[in-house]
């Protein structure tokens, strides 16, 4: 950890271990990974946390169904998540499990703090509880048939005595903070939704039940002030974001927490945009810097991809089939952050063939082939830039700004698209300038053109590093190309060595939809 560098903390949700990792989980994790790599390239000190959520009703049910103890079961599935991220080369700095001692200690510290303030009390409550969501749903949240919209099941009526957190006391404070800092919850549509939900909760006058009696559920963190109860799973799980960075005394917590960003999908907006901030306020901890919310990947039937609905796809075998970078690229480029996106074979291969194979792959292939054909593979063929360099440099200058602007807003798809506009323009320039004609008439111009083109292609590869970390490295390493800046602002930043190119692989092959079915 460097003292002087700007800090950037990013987290995924901690995933429930009642389900195996699927494309939905992989999307959030890859998006955080892409952001972490981008922030590192900007020169920041990044901490990236992921993990698993292992307590609560639905985990016990899943363990029982597999005839395992909760310990055996959670160890097994948590390990599966860990292995999945290792297989996908995710650059997380830590992996937190809610069953770890370091986490339990922090949950109990926070509970004690809030209890000592007088903000936790015992009371009876009856409500409609969705085990899938692990929370009570309000009437407004139910479908017309009275079902949970995400799990398509009627919630259970539960009436029991529990400890309650005085959420009502902190809702107006959080509302006020949000109104003054709309950037805390993004994109904007979710910010508006959160403000409306706060209003609704204030009108309902409900507090938050934060315990479960042990006689019904004992798989959880014991309340430090009553041994008959365990902590409600959300009150436990949300705290991972600070237990995972060493709250309260670790340097990591002190430096990274003020720069924290959580990424989630809209299914868990309410716990993250309401429960968590009010818990933090009650515990006298500053609220996170930002919450970023994305939409759903939809499987068949245009339903949210999930284990419950049986339409989920496993990410590692898909990555092995199409390539790790292709999977990353598809997920990051296809989904507009915040909106839902369909996931099927046709859409997947269309995107990969169009962008990676036709646009980037073809550009690279044509350029390297011409260098081989006309200059015996000499990479560093000219001192001069071609007359089209001015236009290319202008484009880089413009796209550099737009790329960063979009990345900072988590608009991954737009940031990538800005760079693909350069790539498509370079393909057009080949058509317009006709290097094959130059080969017959003007070899000096041809060398300057190919030299300029290769530098421009390399420039785009530097921008694509966060999303295509493997392919960009492979290509740049093969050609021994470097850059004076992590994000080159003109082709003048690109440095070519005296390398002779002999053979190279097809980096972005085409997929045949029928033959490559997933
Ligand atoms: O909610 N599309 O865990 P979870 C997009 N343990 N993203 C999806 C998705 C889909 N179809 N399906 C899952 C929990 N996700 C809690 C979180 S955090 C303190 C506790 C991703 O296993 C997305 O990030 O149900 C979503 O928010 C998360 O997985 C839900 O994971």
Image: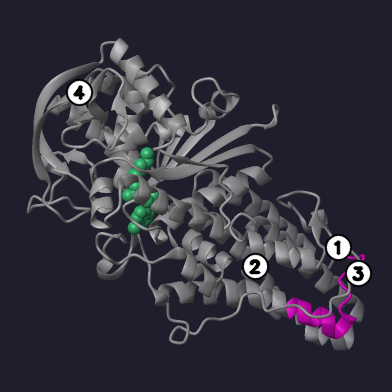
Q: Secondary structure at mark 1?
A: loop
The residue under label 4 is 163
Residue 382: mark in rendering? 3
Q: Is residue 306 visible?
A: yes
Kindly report the distance in space between the C-alpha atoms of the residues bearing marks 2 and 3: 22 Å
Q: Nearer the viewer, residue 80 or 291?
A: 80
Kindly report the distance in space between the C-alpha atoms of the residues bearing marks 4 and 2: 59 Å
Q: Nearer the viewer, residue 7 or 341?
A: 7
**Tag nearer the camera, 1 or 2:** 1
The answer to if 312 sits in the magenta stretch is no
**Tag nearer the camera, 3 or 1:** 1
**Which image quarter holds the N terminus?**
top right
**Within 8 Å of ligand 1, the CB of disc 3?**
no
**Which range of residues does the magenta coloring cover?**
366-384
Kindly report the distance in space between the C-alpha atoms of the residues bearing marks 1 and 2: 19 Å
- For the view shown, which residue lies furthest in the bottom direction? 440
The answer to if 378 sits in the magenta stretch is yes
Q: Secondary structure at mark 3?
A: loop
The residue under label 2 is 423
> Crowdedness of circle 3 by 10 Å Cα count: few (<14), some, many (20+)?
some
Q: Are marks 3 and 1 in contact (CB under 8 Å)?
A: no
Kindly report the distance in space between the C-alpha atoms of the residues bearing marks 3 and 4: 75 Å
Above or below, 425 against 494 in this view is below
Of callouts 3 and 4, which one flags the residue occurring earlier in the amino acid sequence? Answer: 4
């Amino acid at each position: 950890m460097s003292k002087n560098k700007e800090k950037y903390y990013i987290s995924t949700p901690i995933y429930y271990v009642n389900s195996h990792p699927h494309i939905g989980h992989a999307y959030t994790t890859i998006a955080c990974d892409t952001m972490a790599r981008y922030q590192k390239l900007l020169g920041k000190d990044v901490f990236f946390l992921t993990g698993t959520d292992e307590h609560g009703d639905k985990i016990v049910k899943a363990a029982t169904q597999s005839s395992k103890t909760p310990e055996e079961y959670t160890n097994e599935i948590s390990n599966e998540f860990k292995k999945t991220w290792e297989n996908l080369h995710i650059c997380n700095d830590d992996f937190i499990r809610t069953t770890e001692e370091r986490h339990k200690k922090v949950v109990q510290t926070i509970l004690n703090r809030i209890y000592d303030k007088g903000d936790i009390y015992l009371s009876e409550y009856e409500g409609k509880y969705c085990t899938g969501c692990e929370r009570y749903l309000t009437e407004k949240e139910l479908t017309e048939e009275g079902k949970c919209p995400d799990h398509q099941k009627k919630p259970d009526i539960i009436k029991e005595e529990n400890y309650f957190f005085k959420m009502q006391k902190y809702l107006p404070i959080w509302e006020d903070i949000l109104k003054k800092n709309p950037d805390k919850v993004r994109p904007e549509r979710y910010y508006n939704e959160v403000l409306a939900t706060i209003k609704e909760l204030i009108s309902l006058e409900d507090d938050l039940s934060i315990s479960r009696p042990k006689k019904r559920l004992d798989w959880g963190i014991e309340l430090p002030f009553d041994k008959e109860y365990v902590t409600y799973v959300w009150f436990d799980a949300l705290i991972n974001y600070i237990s995972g960075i060493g709250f309260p005394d670790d340097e990591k917590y002190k430096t990274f927490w003020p720069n924290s960003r959580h990424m989630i999908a809209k299914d868990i907006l309410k716990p993250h945009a309401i429960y968590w901030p009010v818990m933090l306020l009650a515990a006298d901890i500053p609220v996170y810097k930002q919450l970023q919310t994305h939409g759903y990947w939809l499987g068949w039937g245009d339903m949210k991809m999930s284990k419950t609905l049986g339409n989920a796809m496993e990410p590692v075998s898909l990555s092995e089939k199409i390539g790790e970078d292709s999977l990353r690229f598809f997920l990051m480029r296809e989904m507009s952050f915040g909106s839902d996106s369909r996931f099927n074979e046709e859409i997947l291969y269309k995107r990969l063939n169009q962008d990676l194979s036709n646009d980037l792959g073809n550009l690279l292939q044509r350029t390297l082939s011409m260098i081989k054909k006309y200059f015996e593979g000499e990479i560093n063929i000219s001192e001069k830039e071609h007359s089209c360099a001015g236009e290319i440099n202008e484009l880089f200058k413009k796209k550099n700004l737009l790329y960063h602007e979009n990345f900072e807003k988590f608009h991954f798809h737009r940031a990538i698209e800005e760079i693909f506009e350069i790539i498509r323009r370079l393909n057009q320039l080949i058509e317009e300038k006709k290097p094959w004609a130059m080969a017959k008439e003007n070899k000096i111009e041809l060398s300057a053109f190919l030299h300029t083109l290769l530098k421009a292609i390399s420039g785009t590869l530097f921008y694509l590093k966060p999303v295509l970390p493997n392919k960009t490295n492979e290509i740049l390493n093969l050609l021994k190309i470097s850059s004076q800046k992590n994000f080159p602002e003109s082709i003048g930043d690109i440095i070519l060595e005296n390398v002779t190119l002999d053979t190279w692989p097809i980096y972005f092959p085409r997929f045949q939809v029928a033959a490559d079915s997933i």
